Image: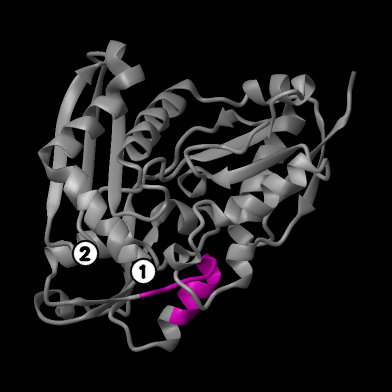
């Protein structure tokens, strides 16, 4: 059996770039494909912070519905935006080789504010908490919208800078000269990776996508997302995680962190494990954080976000 694989995507420039990347890889393998653009609620409601909308996966939900109702066969997402529990019937079919995992600060050409007071824009509680932990004299403001919208808002406001994922800006050639790597900031679980999801009963499509899967990225993002799920972070709590595979000695180096929303409390783990431990590694690291004060901190975060 052959069929045209319909690739669902949001209509932002970055989402389309991701969909076209998967389209190109499938076509190189000889598959016929078609791109179908779908608008998401996360793109339409720009005046509320994501955590107030109370939905993890607001950017993926519309595509999930389109897939379950048979309008599209696959959806391509930035993996860090995808909830750790997928809807019934939808499965992770491929994780593409990971790009840059670093967060960057885009500024206005002057970094003097780093030594004094400044205002930093970000829609991410994780970035906000880590920034305030390092720069307690600074103020954080909410910044929403797709990458292009956020870059535009930075230019229009008198903020000192805004934080972005390097991968997103690099993919659509938007990374400006006026930026610095925040290599001290622990990224979102699965940052820099793209995931393709499909229906679990669609064998033709699953077979096609299996050929795109990058096993090393799949394992590292699995560990990070398991860490996130065990801490019960959804997409909202200030949680960072990064697993890096070292082939010289077959180890995984894992860094995981949980912050309070104001950045003042920080519970972290940073060490190396043998690759054989990968299946439970994220879970075990999260348990350690929960046992070291993380349970109380998560309860405090949840009660703050409900207000």
Q: CA distance from mark 1 to mark 2?
A: 10 Å
On whether residue 107 falls in the magenta region, the answer is no
Q: Which residues are magenta?
A: 142-153
- Dot label at residue 131: 2
Q: Residue at x 28, y 15 (%)?
A: 277
User: Closest to the observer: 130 or 161?
Assistant: 130
Depicted 140 relative to depicted 241: above or below = below
- Judging from the image, what secondary structure is the residue with disc 1 in? loop
Left or right, 186 with reference to 114: right
Q: Residue at x 60, y 50 (%)?
A: 60
Task: Examine the rendering and report whether any part of residue 71 can be seen.
Answer: yes
Q: Residue at x 56, y 25 (%)?
A: 213
Mark 1 crowdedness (10 Å alpha carbons): few <14, some 14-19, many ≥20: many
Task: Examine the rendering and report whether any part of residue 182 can be seen.
Answer: no
Q: In the rendering, at what x and y percent does residue 103 appear?
A: 33, 55
Which residue was labeled with disc 1? Answer: 122
Depicted 102 relative to depicted 154: above or below = above
Depicted 65 relative to depicted 85: above or below = below
Quadrant of the drawing holding the C terminus: bottom left
Q: In the rendering, at what x and y percent does residue 31 appear?
A: 80, 28
Quadrant of the drawing holding the N terminus: top right
Left or right, 125 with reference to 156: left
On whether residue 145 falls in the magenta region, the answer is yes
Q: In the rendering, at what x and y percent does residue 249 appear?
A: 22, 13
- Dot label at residue 19: none
Q: Residue at x 29, y 54 (%)?
A: 238
How is the model colour-coded? one colour
Asked if the residue at tag 2 contacts the one at tag 1, i.e. Cβ–Cβ closer than 8 Å, the answer is yes
Left or right, 58 with reference to 258: right
Tell me which numbered mark, 1 or 2, is placed earlier along the sequence. 1
Tell me the quarter of the picture where residue 263 sits: bottom left
């Amino acid at each position: 059996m052959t069929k045209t694989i319909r690739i669902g995507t949001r209509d932002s420039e970055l989402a389309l770039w991701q969909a076209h990347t998967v389209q190109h890889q499938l076509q190189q393998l000889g598959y016929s494909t078609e791109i179908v653009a779908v608008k998401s609620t996360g793109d339409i409601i720009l005046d509320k912070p994501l955590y107030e909308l109370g939905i993890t996966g607001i950017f993926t939900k519309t595509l999930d519905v389109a897939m379950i109702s048979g309008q599209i066969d696959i959806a391509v997402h930035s993996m860090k935006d995808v909830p750790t529990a997928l809807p019934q019937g939808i499965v992770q079919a491929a994780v593409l080789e990971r790009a840059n995992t670093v967060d960057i600060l885009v500024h206005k050409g002057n970094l003097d504010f780093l030594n004094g007071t400044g205002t930093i824009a970000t829609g991410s509680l994780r970035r906000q908490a880590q920034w305030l932990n390092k720069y307690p004299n600074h103020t954080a403001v909410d910044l929403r919208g797709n990458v292009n919208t956020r870059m535009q808002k930075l230019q229009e406001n008198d903020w000192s800078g805004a934080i972005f994922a390097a991968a997103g800006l690099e993919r659509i050639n938007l990374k400006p000269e006026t930026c610095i790597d925040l290599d001290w900031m622990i990224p979102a679980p699965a940052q820099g990776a793209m995931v393709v999801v499909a229906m679990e009963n669609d064998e033709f499509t699953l077979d096609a996508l299996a050929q795109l899967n990058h096993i090393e990225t799949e394992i590292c993002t699995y560990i990070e997302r398991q860490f996130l799920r065990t801490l019960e972070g959804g997409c909202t709590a200030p949680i960072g995680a990064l697993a890096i595979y070292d082939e010289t000695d077959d180890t995984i180096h894992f860094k995981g962190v949980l912050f309070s929303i104001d950045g003042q409390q920080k519970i972290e783990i940073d060490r190396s494990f043998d690759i054989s431990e990968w299946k439970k590694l994220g879970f075990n690291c999260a348990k350690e954080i929960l046992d070291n004060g993380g349970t109380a901190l998560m309860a405090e975060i949840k009660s703050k976000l409900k207000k």
